[in-house]
Image (cartoon, rainbow, N blue to C red):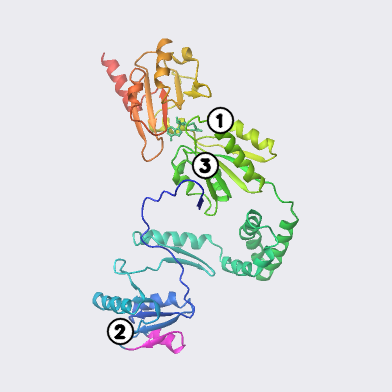
Amino acid sequence: MFYIVGQKQGRFAMNHFPIFVALEGRRVLVAGGGEAAVAKLRLLLKTTAHITVVAPQIDPVIEGWAREGRVTVIRRAQEPGDALCCVLAYAAHEDEALDARTVRLSAADGALVNVVDNLLASQFITPAIVDRDPVTVAIGTEGAAPVLARKIKADLEARLPAQLGLLARIAKTFRRAAEALPMGAARRRFWAAYYEDAGPRAAEQGDEAIRPALEDLLADHLSADARPGHVDLVGAGPGDPELLTLKARKALDAADVVIHDRLVAPEILELARREATIIDAGKEGFGPSTAQGDINALMVEHGLQGTHVVRLKAGDPTVFGRLDEEIEALEAAGLAWSIVPGITAASAAVASIGQSLTKRGRNGSVRFLTGHDMKGFADQDWRALAQPGEVAAIYMGKRAARWMQGRLLMHGAAPATPVTVVENASRADQRTIDATLATLPEALDGVSGPALLLHGLAPRAAAATLAQSEIAL
Ligand code: SAH
């Protein structure tokens, strides 16, 4: 993933860096001649490496491979120099002392050493692989969860079509031809259509149908008018990636460019296509209106290049998201757009306190308010909201809290009206503060993340205690 602004927020260091090592014509040493060696050799024999097995005792299976000329056998214990010019060496004695000796000797000879089934003693580890040559999927858990790795492998084995390797090999011979399409989005669309649809369909009719299908597909794509870009205005939800809609997920999978707000969680950006350009259009609160103009310009600029743009907005894009201004800019530029709804902060906040936004006999309507508008603190129908039982979800309410408190009290609201503050709703650092209208401004001290105020609602547990004490009175 390519970030223009902002940094990838890796919290855990990757201890094993995945790479694919070219083994053609290179030497690999396997020290040990038993079952563990046989298992490693089965994998290594998929390559064209020159493989040497060194061990006093050699399993008959390995003897067979030696007779076929596929491995070289040295029938003695490993000696210094055996691993010279080897890229990799495997210690496969299933014996700690012998393996330790192999590590020492091979490292001295300059090879990277793996000790079978011993993560800590190994300089490199071999991942679980799904083989659709030339497509190889490597799965590693840094030794933490081999069972999980096996499950992922099984899932992928089931999901990746058996002809994937064949499709990729034929594609390789077609790369030149495909260069007739302009580089970038157009070419990507072509290859996506091949792998996802045209290729597998052709393969069902037989291998020889694949190349003609590619030719037809290319002709289609060349003749199609350069497609105009498309902008999806996508709700990223309140922060928990599991609260993304499937549509949002798909849009992120397909996006060439993702333009996101400051509030969109890094875990969600991680889900974007790896090659996607990620642009942070974050702006503080209701910042200067020029910033919005810049965002509009960015969307239009990328959209007009024919790319698939995802404009990723916190929560639901239709709630306090300046959506109309963005749509007007897209329409003025003649770009197609669509809205993908998201879960708004109010829904996540109210869920976190086990309450319902509406309730029979309590409130038959609910207000979504903003504490700020373009002119500053936003005026609202305070008289109506001050009535008992009324519920409002207040967005951007932190700075306006004291002012709103004054307005509501002036219009007759009870100082004991519950107001629950939910900070970072649905995120790992979610926090709820059980306040009242009287204590609200103080309750907000130290709240630094995005916060939603639920006017008229206390957390369910607190509400129950309150009801109890009222009965006691
Ligand atoms: N479109 C967004 C709202 C954008 S306005 C939505 O539908 O949720 C930004 C305000 O939303 C913040 O000031 C805060 O009040 C609220 N907000 C957004 N994400 C939040 C979260 N995870 N927890 C609490 N409040 C949040």
Per the rendering, the mark at residue 289 is 1
Vertically, is 231 above or below 176?
A: above
- Of residues 292 and 266, the one drawn nearer to the viewer in this rendering: 292
- Of residues 27 and 236, the one drawn nearer to the viewer in this rendering: 27
x%, y% of residue 285? 47, 31
For label 3, the SS is: loop
**Going by the picture, which residue comes out furthest to the right?**
223
Q: Nearer the viewer, mark 1 or mark 3?
A: 1
Residue where numbered disc 2 is placed: 80
For label 1, the SS is: helix
Callout 3 touching callout 2 (CB < 8 Å): no
- Bin the neighbour count of mark 1 within 10 Å (Cα to Cα): few under 14, some 14-19, many 20 and up: few
Q: Quadrant of the C terminus?
A: top left
Quarter of the rendering containing residue 330: top right
Residue type at mark 1: give it.
Ser
Vertically, is 314 above or below 80?
A: above
x%, y% of residue 137? 48, 64
Quarter of the rendering containing residue 471: top left
Residue type at mark 2: give it.
Pro
Label whose residue precedes the other's in the sequence (2 or 1): 2
Give the magenta part as a residue range.
60-75
x%, y% of residue 200? 62, 62
Residue type at mark 3: give it.
Thr
Label whose residue precedes the other's in the sequence (3 or 2): 2
Q: CA distance from mark 1 to mark 3?
A: 30 Å
Q: Nearer the viewer, mark 3 or mark 2?
A: 2
Residue where numbered disc 3 is placed: 245
